[in-house]
Image (spheres, rainbow, N blue to C red):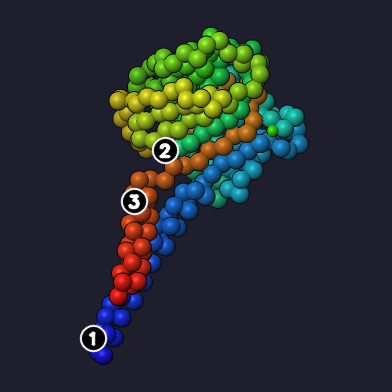
Amino acid sequence: MSSLKACFREKRSGLVAVATVFAMSFCLCLSAAAQDVVDTFSRADSTDLGVTEDPNHWQWLEAGGDLQILNGTLDMPTGGMAVIDQTAGGTLFRPADIELSATMVSAAGSYVAMSYRNTGLGSNPYANGGYSLWVLKTGGVYMYSTWLGPTGVGDIGVQDLTVPHTMRILVVGNSHKAWWDGNLVVDTADPGLPVLAGGYVYLTDGENLNGITWDNVEATIIPEPASMLALLCGLGGLFSLRRRSARS
Ligand SMILES: [Ca+2]
Ligand SMILES: [Ca+2]
């Protein structure tokens, strides 16, 4: 009888330990997921960009030009730059691994670009350390890395950039992938990657364009592998304990 009690106590303390690990891991992942950015710019026309629509309310920083909310979009003049900055509580948006997407229209139709993991602020993000993905109207797709320079990574044929297109970027470690209107157009690795410390996300007009209109911006921080591993271990431990309980 006493050995039965001891066995029960052991099993219960094991369950508590695994549940604690699981809860902590789950919270870690939730805190990462809670850093989502969503903005459809569905607010009144204003030269003040305000904050994003997700519950975090990230601040938009005008890093170049006078940007404005116009007809439910973010309207960016030549040389304009918008940066997702921080929450009112001071949490910084400086992800390393991220999924990023937006709809964009280029008034002059020359090219469109988004920058990420950028190490500095300023009207020319290419002068900082960081990455950008461009699609040219000629159909050339380029990935710019401070460490490798502009690298042609695809050709998708002539594009009419004066109508809305969607760019989606997924960067994890040194893997960079991009989709254009839902089609995978970049799948490459940057062997020169020196750091994974993260950086700013820019919506960029470049220096010699004629304005871009942005809409439906979404950004999600990809949880660190350590958090994911802890979550999987927690789940695995819970399931194995349940299996053992069911057998005995
Ligand atoms: Ca403004
Ligand atoms: Ca909109």
Q: What amino acid does circle 3 point to? A: Leu
Q: What amino acid does circle 2 point to? A: Asp
- Above or below residue 181? Residue 13 is below
Tell which tag, 2 or 1, sits nearer the viewer.
1
Task: Return the disc, 3 or 2, that comes first in the chain's sequence.
Answer: 2
Tell which tag, 3 or 1, sits nearer the viewer.
1
- Residue labelled with disc 1: 3
Tell which tag, 3 or 2, sits nearer the viewer.
3
Marks 3 and 2, Cα distance to the nearest angstrom?
16 Å
> SS of the residue at dot 3?
helix
- Residue labelled with disc 3: 229
Determine contact: label 3, label 2, CB under 8 Å. no
Task: Give x and y (percent) for residue 231.
Answer: 38, 55
Q: What amino acid does circle 1 point to? A: Ser
- Residue labelled with disc 2: 97
- Above or below residue 168? Residue 50 is below
Task: Return the disc, 3 or 1, that comes first in the chain's sequence.
Answer: 1
Marks 2 and 1, Cα distance to the nearest angstrom?
50 Å
> SS of the residue at dot 1?
helix
Residue under the image location 66 percent in, 39 percent down: 50
Determine contact: label 3, label 1, CB under 8 Å. no
Marks 3 and 1, Cα distance to the nearest angstrom?
35 Å
Q: Quarter of the image holding residue 85?
A: top right
* Neighbour tally class for label 3: few under 14, some 14-19, many 20 plus, Cα within 10 Å: few
Residue under the image location 32 percent in, 64 percent down: 240
Task: Give x and y (percent) for residue 125.
Answer: 48, 24
Task: Return the disc, 2 or 1, that comes first in the chain's sequence.
Answer: 1
Task: Give x and y (percent) for residue 26.
Answer: 43, 57
Which residue sits furthest bottom?
A: 1
Residue in front for this viewpoint, 78 or 135: 135
